[in-house]
Image (cartoon, rainbow, N blue to C red):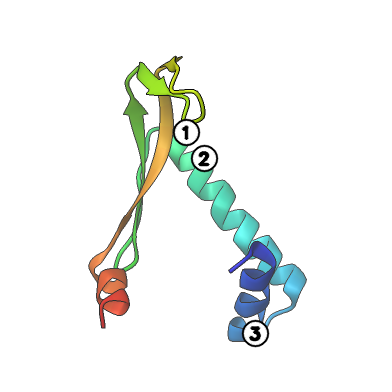
Amino acid sequence: MTRTELIGRMATAADISRDQAKAALEAFTDGVVEALTHGQDVRLVGFGSFVAVDRKAGVARNPQTGEAVARPASRTARFRPGEGLKSALNG
């Protein structure tokens, strides 16, 4: 599902305009980004959690050449699915 398709589905399900759905989605994503950059987790009970994690520096390999490449330390986001989402996916 693309962002546009998600906005359309949100608009239909909530009986709001596409512009309102787009604004709601942007507010959600902006809120998640802001929380993660400030070291906070975002927990949606029954759906899952967005968490910021630190990746250590290491060595990666270029898949085309096999050459070793230094990978710097960085922060990234992870999503951990909640029980409700897991149950929906597994029947």
Is residue 5 toward the left or the right of residue 83 in the image?
right
Residue depicted at x 65% and y 84%: 12
Residue depicted at x 74% and y 74%: 18
Is residue 56 toward the left or the right of residue 19 in the image?
left
Disc 3 and disc 1 in contact, CB within 8 angstroms: no
Relative to 77, is 42 above or below?
below
Is residue 32 toward the left or the right of residue 42 in the image?
right
Relative to 37, is 12 above or below?
below
The three-letter amino acid code for the residue at tag 2 is Glu
Tell me, yes or no, if residue 71 can be seen here. Answer: no
Q: Position of residue 50 (x, y in %)?
A: 38, 49
Tag count: 3
Q: Quadrant of residue 1?
A: bottom right
Q: Which residue is mark 1?
A: 37
Q: CA distance from mark 3 to mark 1?
A: 32 Å
Q: Residues within 10 Å of mark 3 (few under 14, many from 20)?
A: few
The three-letter amino acid code for the residue at tag 1 is Thr
Q: Which residue is mark 3?
A: 12
Mark 2 secondary-structure assignment: helix
Q: Which residue is mark 2?
A: 34
Q: Residues within 10 Å of mark 2 (few under 14, many from 20)?
A: few
Q: Position of residue 60 (x, y in %)?
A: 39, 22
Q: Which of the marked residues, 2 or 3, is nearer the chain's N terminus?
A: 3
Q: CA distance from mark 2 to mark 1?
A: 5 Å
The three-letter amino acid code for the residue at tag 3 is Thr
Disc 2 and disc 1 in contact, CB within 8 angstroms: yes
Q: Position of residue 32 (x, y in %)?
A: 49, 48
Q: CA distance from mark 2 to mark 3?
A: 28 Å
